[in-house]
Amino acid sequence: EATIAVLPFVNLGPDPDSDYFADGIAETLLNQLADIDGLQVASRTSSFRFRSAAGEATPALAEIAQALQVRYLIEGSVRREAERFQVSVQLTDATTGYQRWSQRYDGRWGEILTTQQAITRSVVEQIAPPLLSGAIAAADLAGTATDPVAYELYLRGRHLWNERHPQALAEAMVLFERAAALQPDFALAYTGQAECILTAATYAGLAPEAAQQRAKALLDQALALAPDAPETRMALGNYYAARTQWPEAEAELLAAVALRPSSDAAHMLLGTVYSERGDLVAAYSRLRTAQQLNPLHATVALNLAQAASRLGLHERARRYLDRVQQLAPAHPFVFGLRTVVELSAGNTEGLQALLQQWQGQARELAEAAGTDDINRRIACGMASLTLQQPEQTRRCLLPLLDHPAWRELGPHYQMLALTHLASANATDADPGQATQWRTMAIEIGETALQAQPGSEILLYELAIAHLGLGDIEQARTLIEQSLREGRMELGLMQHDVRLSDLRPDPAFVQSLQRLEQVQRSQRERVLQRYPGAAWR
């Protein structure tokens, strides 16, 4: 029963900008507890969902504990005025509703690090005394601050990094740099800088090689200072995954899980790595572990939906997507993945319903000119071509070519849009323009493969472009290469109308049959281990 969640602490100070301090104290406590072997800690993503805005009613503690699947809850408040601080912490046993322990800590800012350690030890003494030796070790986190000013800069940086948008990431980068300058052996300050670079790349497409190498140099520096810091191992796994270096990514993420077993983020990224390598059984297993650790994380549910679809478990995928929309109604990737699921299932009625939904929101999305508009347009273009509606395909996709974000769009999405437009034009409009678009797609794909060698998605879209130009032999070769990578989704290949000229080819038929055998075997193993998609 050593299960616990740290709820967001409340900032009671006069300065609303001190929210970083409240979040930082709670997050550091959460990480210290998470590093204790034998203690299961709810993730930050899940527990911080229960932050109450001004005027909002807070759910009962018993409801929160049930949602997070924990027994104990930690609440707290902080007050910071000049160089003095006050931290109040209370521990509640949700099974009885009684407060188990509470304490108020007052001190000067120079004492904040020892106070943080004292809080961790006191909590563990109350809920699991046999784990106290682990608590003492965890309170001295690998690679953490010893300088209180550097620690404050780091807390400010983490607060901004969690916002994820470009301006916040740029400001966080400066704060992490200042923290490292103040305390040169502060490993997590270097990790924070690298995470800013990698996170910016996630939201803006593949980072330039120079930026990636800078991130790697920072992570190497952090690793040399603190080889046992799970944050650094996790960031290294993210770095290698972004470069499609799957064995290296797996090794670093396994190290992160060994150091912090309750890291849902590490399990989730491991699931992605296994999925990219074609091991859908291991991928699904890791994602279910992430789900158990973080039942309120929309991205975990999204990744489970994708894995289920690739296994041919389309109804299960739909249920996971329903869960995503419960947790994050405005999630930008749900519509696109719903389209992929219905395409993979060959469900034309479902595709038509999604098209109608998009048509009802198209003007509003276009005016916003954001990521959601781009994702939905690409999804609708795919659905329209499958439904043999070339004019609708053009209405969906043509505006993307002049979209402000076209150049920042990932190469796979650019190729996807161009090859679908080309297929629509070749059907009933301008074959010459179709040839130009396919040629553009080939140029984009060949350039992108230099940075992402072996990417099965890029190889697949290159095959589509060559097939449209009549080069069946080259298309067959590229399809075989993409299948060797092990990730292509059988249902999509079975229903992709752009492959119609290749379907009679005996080699292609055999490739699909081999893929079907692999998928069937993996699906049976997953169903045996996880007979239902119930969201615990």
Image: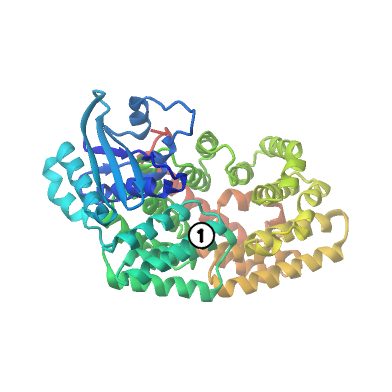
Nearer the observer, 300 or 128:
128
Q: Identify the residue shown where x is 28% and y is 38%.
A: 88
Residue 302 position in % (x across, y down): 51, 44
In the picture shown, does residue 523 fall above or below 234? above
Residue 395 position in % (x across, y down): 81, 49
Quarter of the image with the C terminus is: top left
Q: Identify the residue shown where x is 80% and y is 67%.
A: 435
Residue 110 position in % (x across, y down): 26, 57
Q: Residues within 10 Å of mark 1 (few under 14, many from 20)?
A: many
Residue type at mark 1 is Leu
The answer to which image quadrant residue 461 occupies is: bottom right
Numbered-mark total:
1
Label 1 secondary element: helix
Residue located beneath label 1 in the image: 169
Q: Identify the residue shown where x is 42% and y is 46%.
A: 19
Q: Is residue 109 left or right of residue 429?
A: left
In the picture shown, does residue 451 fall above or below 233? below
In the picture shown, does residue 167 fall above or below 291? below
Nearer the observer, 198 or 464:
198
The answer to which image quadrant residue 179 occupies is: bottom left
Nearer the observer, 239 or 315:
239
Quarter of the image with the N terminus is: top left
